[in-house]
Image: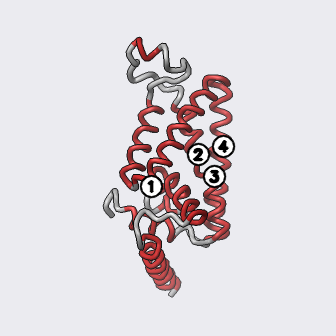
Amino acid sequence: MGLLDLEKHFAFYGSYHSNPINIVVHIFFVWPILFTALLFFYFTPPIFSPPQTLLNVIPSFLIFNFGFFFAIFYALFYVALDIKAGSFVALLTLLCWVSSSFLANSIGFDLAWKVGLVTQLFCWTAQITSHFVFEKRAPALLDNLAQAFLMAPFFVVLEILQKTIGYEPYSGFERNVKARIATNIKEWKGKQRKKVT
């Protein structure tokens, strides 16, 4: 699977997220996971300091540490996947970095770690449970870690854009993805039947 092959990635994601309740659960819980990961990263040491002229303009709570590079990497990757939706998701990712930095700076290390840990545990539990209860299938992270940690924030936004405004990265994208999803699910069900017999 090519790293920037959006159609294949989204079809893979869709194969694990075809139940409407499971989709809604992911829409609500994927982004808090990203936000609290950035909250944790706030407490990593700075990798670089901006020039003094920029320090007067940049809010003091913004630290150019691992969280910053994590957010930048995600943002650039999303833009590379699809310039329009990717730019929007990149903006959301950078806003998560700024707001998580502000929150971490405001509440301090001890409380930030508690909030982050509880949120991570709750969100991951909700998503994993949703997969087994509604999707009747193990989560994608068991088959593709990049899907769970890198692609999921982009895909839940892309899914919302498709459902609300009919957005497609290119003409025929949704049709091609639906066909691939149907094929992927059919293959998975075939493998499940073989395991039973």
The image position of residue 167, as x and y in percent, is 51, 63
Q: Amino acid at mark 2?
A: Ile
Of badges 4 and 3, the one in the foreground is 3
Q: Earlier in the sequence, mark 1 or mark 4?
A: 4
Q: Nearer the viewer, residue 104 or 110?
A: 104
Q: Residue at x 60, y 27 (%)?
A: 102
Q: Which mark is residue 119?
A: 4
Local crowd size for mark 1, using a 10 Å CA cut-off: few (<14), some (14–19), many (≥20): few
Residue 11 makes an appearance in the image: yes
The secondary element bearing badge 4 is classed as: helix
Instruction: State the residue lying farthest toward the bottom.
Output: 197
Could you give the CA–CA distance between mark 4 and mark 3, rounded to whole angstroms? 9 Å
Q: Amino acid at mark 4?
A: Thr
Q: Amino acid at mark 1?
A: Leu
Could you give the CA–CA distance between mark 1 and mark 4, rounded to whole angstroms? 20 Å
Could you give the CA–CA distance between mark 1 and mark 3, rounded to whole angstroms? 17 Å
How many marks overall?
A: 4
Residue under label 3? 29
Q: Is residue 128 left or right of residue 67?
A: right
Image quarter of residue 12: bottom left
Q: Which mark is residue 33?
A: 2
Could you give the CA–CA distance between mark 3 and mark 2, rounded to whole angstroms? 7 Å
Image quarter of residue 135: bottom right
Local crowd size for mark 2, using a 10 Å CA cut-off: few (<14), some (14–19), many (≥20): many
